[in-house]
Amino acid sequence: MIHLPNLKHISDEDIADILERAHKIKRNPRDYTSLLPQQTLGMLFQKTSTRTRVSFEAGMTELGGSAIFIDWNASNFILTDVAYEIEYMSRNVDCIMARLLHHEDIQTIVAASQVPVINGCCEKYHPCQALTDLFTIQEYTDKPLDQVTLVYAGVQNNVSNSLTLICERLGTQLILATPDPDPQGESADADVQNAIQSSSNIEHTTDINSAVREADFVYTDTWIDMQYFNDTSRTAENKATLEKMLPYQLNETLLEGRSCKIMHDMPIHADFEISPGLVRDPRSVIFEQAANRKHAQKGLLWWLFEQADQLIQ
């Protein structure tokens, strides 16, 4: 059974195949409206969501299938063993997408499921976002991916982990302009740190000013994980994080005179990781990047259903 808990066990060729399928669907969406008839995607959400829910639900509908939304906290997932609920759920749907707080629960779901499982986001990885990001880069440059320089500015987290994994595989030059990561942090991953240390195309720096000089694309993400942003018990900790991270803000001064495209995976906290003026700057591709979640995930669903021999001929 093929699953996508992260991007560690998928081949370079498969990643390229998924991206090409996504481009085909975006160019000619009406050619694929009957690709997944009678197929159902079960969408399990423990984390809040806008883009993940909208893009997967719309994407399945546009491919001729359907999607079911399951709220973790309004279902029996809060009452019993995750594996029991998934074994039941996977007997009723054709694929599961789970957006959860903990990667260990993603692993439990993969082990228990009778159908393919997609990690829709967890504290360690965001593979669907990374696929979308490389898809978006392909749209906005004529360079092959192994000649592109992408600068990620902010905190090392699930997004930067997945970017590191996919860029290492495809040869994209990735510069992580971040503070030194906490080796005990919730998103810490030994494979990612090994890639940063050993890969010729992955680099870490604490100097954002030097990093952006080489950038074709500059990317940022929220500095505080979304479930903690409005947590009053973390007010002091969040304030300290914001003050520490201000030197890594994307703003007009940092990018003055530069032609690089500006990326952000959203949700945006303007005046924190990015200045409001850059969100809709002519160089910004943020909203098209967000819209591309649907197209990239359509490519992924097509590939995944085909790998599982679940396409209805």
Image: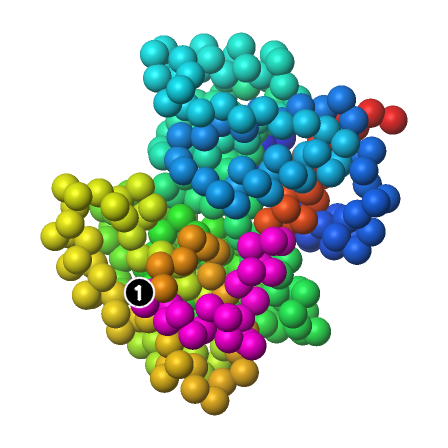
Q: Residue at x 57, y 40 (%)?
A: 54
Q: Secondary structure at mark 1?
A: loop
User: Does 296 sit above or below residue 285?
Assistant: above
In this figure, which residue is indicated by the disc labeled 1? 272
Is 31 positioned to the left or the right of 286 in the image? right
Coloured how?
rainbow
Residue 209: percent from the left, percent from the top? 35, 81
Q: Residue at x 82, y 33 (%)?
A: 34
Is 142 positioned to the left or the right of 206 in the image? right
- Of all residues shown, which one is farthest toward the bottom? 257
Per the image, is 28 magenta?
no
User: Does 283 sit above or below residue 11?
Assistant: below
Residue 69: percent from the left, percent from the top? 54, 26
Which of the image's four quarters has the N terminus?
Answer: top right
Which residue occupies the foreground of this view, 144 or 242?
A: 242
Q: Residue at x 70, y 44 (%)?
A: 299
Q: How many marks?
A: 1
Per the image, is 291 magenta?
yes
Q: Is residue 291 visible?
A: yes
Which residue occupies the foreground of this view, 80 or 195?
A: 80
Residue 186: percent from the left, percent from the top? 28, 43
Which residue occupies the foreground of this view, 145 or 297?
A: 297
Q: Residue at x 45, y 40 (%)?
A: 49
Mark 1 crowdedness (10 Å alpha carbons): few <14, some 14-19, many ≥20: some
What is the quadrant of residue 92 in the picture?
A: top right
Is 112 positioned to the left or the right of 183 in the image? right
Q: Is residue 187 visible?
A: no
Residue 182: percent from the left, percent from the top? 24, 53
- Tell me which amino acid carries mark 1: Phe
User: Does 234 sit above or below residue 196?
Assistant: above
Q: State which region is magenta.
A: 271-292
User: Does 133 sit above or below residue 205?
Assistant: above
